[in-house]
Image (cartoon, rainbow, N blue to C red):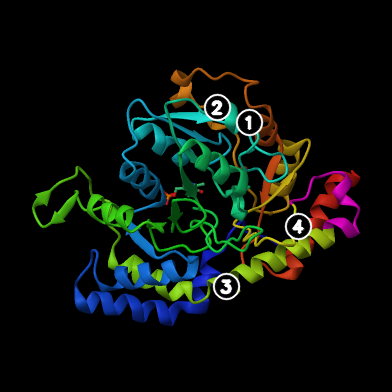
Amino acid sequence: MRVPFLDLKAQYAAIKSEIRRAMDEVCADQQFVLGPRVRRLEEEIARYCGAPHAVGVSSGTDALLLALMALGIGAGDEVITTPYTFIATAGSIARSGARPVFVDIDPTRFTIDPKPIADRITERTRAILPVHLFGRCAEMEPIRALAAQHQLAVIEDAAQAIGAEDEFGRRAGCIGLLGCFSFYPTKNLGGFGDGGMVITNDPSLASTLVALRNHGASTRYLHSLLGGNFRLDELQAAILSVKLTRLDQWTKQRINNAERYDALFRSRGLEHHIRLPEIPKNERHVFNQYVIRAPRRDELSHFLESRGIGHDIYYPVPLHLQACFKYLGYKEGDMPVSEQAAKEALALPIYPELTPPMAEYVVDAFQAFYDR
Ligand SMILES: *Cc1c(COP(=O)(O)O)cnc(C)c1O
């Protein structure tokens, strides 16, 4: 057997005719950028996430940069975030001109640890940017309280977490001031290329975002703000609207797969060798990734490869140790929890179309590895 890490062809096969019809409509209309399908998708995503405003943009990275720009964050400012995430999170902060300030993660959730944040707040701090990593919400209540106390904005990187809910049933992206999503093909709601969305409760921020994504134009050829080309196109929007109708079903399948892995690993006593991800009961973890922690991770990775089992490592080098952030002055040992996670984390196939025999084959391989 072979178990791919992700199987987008299987997903496409199940919805092909609907997708092709939606694409054909765009081809017939020949309106490709920021048209009626983008507006419809914005309404659908706003409703899905429980936010009044949604602004379609060109990628998750651009969603983050645009959110920072809309708040006027730039040179001289600091933004607090996690070092255990995709480069886009801190990269966007740095590209805005602001300085990323890293705070280590919670070892169980893999998301920013709220407790040390207070010590990192200075008079230059403008925002806190938590990431809902792997599909589980960061611990938002203490972050919101700190932000309110210090008058900071909270920007959520919800790129991996569309539809995730915290313990109060609030959906990822609308817990803070601005929420950023990615429609990159490997996300839970993925397009046929790049795309993203920013959501917010704030109507004036929403209109700033709308202007900034199209060169800061409030009226055509009148530019009160300096923006850029952050536009979403109609083909992506048309495809994403079709896929959004399946998202809850796919999410349920992801959660089922996580529960299946959990039961299988435990039935073989493997939870003593590896740390399994928590499956929270009173939150909705949407499992963009199912990430275990394993000692001897790289050896395990080779073994899985030899058995034809797709897997990936998120993230092998935390951001505070990346060459592009050398100027920030961090060194090894500064973020011990993130550094440990970088050495131990291993993501297993969790996509909706993964079958029970495939999950069993994966767990069999773990047993063989640890019984050797
Ligand atoms: C994917 C991702 C992004 C960037 O999204 P793109 O659409 O690829 O630009 C940002 N942050 C996180 C946590 C992501 O996983």
Instruction: Report the magenta residues as a range.
Output: 265-277
As measured in the structure, the alpha-carbon distance from the residue carrying label 3 to the one carrying label 2 is 38 Å
Instruction: Write down the quadrant of residue 168 in the picture.
Output: bottom right
21 and 49: which is toward the camera: 49
Q: Quadrant of the C terminus?
A: top right
- Residue marked by disc 4: 362
Label 3 vs 2, first from the N-terminus: 2
Closest to the camera, between mark 3 and mark 4, is 3
Mark 3 falls on what kind of element?
helix
SS state under label 2: helix
The answer to the question of whether label 1 and label 2 lie on touching residues, with beta carbons closer than 8 A, is yes
Q: Relative to 85, is 282 above or below?
A: below
Q: Residue at x 38, y 29 (%)?
A: 77
Q: Counting residues from the N terminus, which is met first, the one under dot 1 or under dot 4? A: 1
Residue on which disc 2 sits? 120
Identity of the amino acid at label 3?
Answer: Asp
| Secondary structure type for disc 1 | loop
The reply to whether the magenta stretch includes residue 272 is yes
Q: Locate the N terminus by quadrant.
A: bottom right
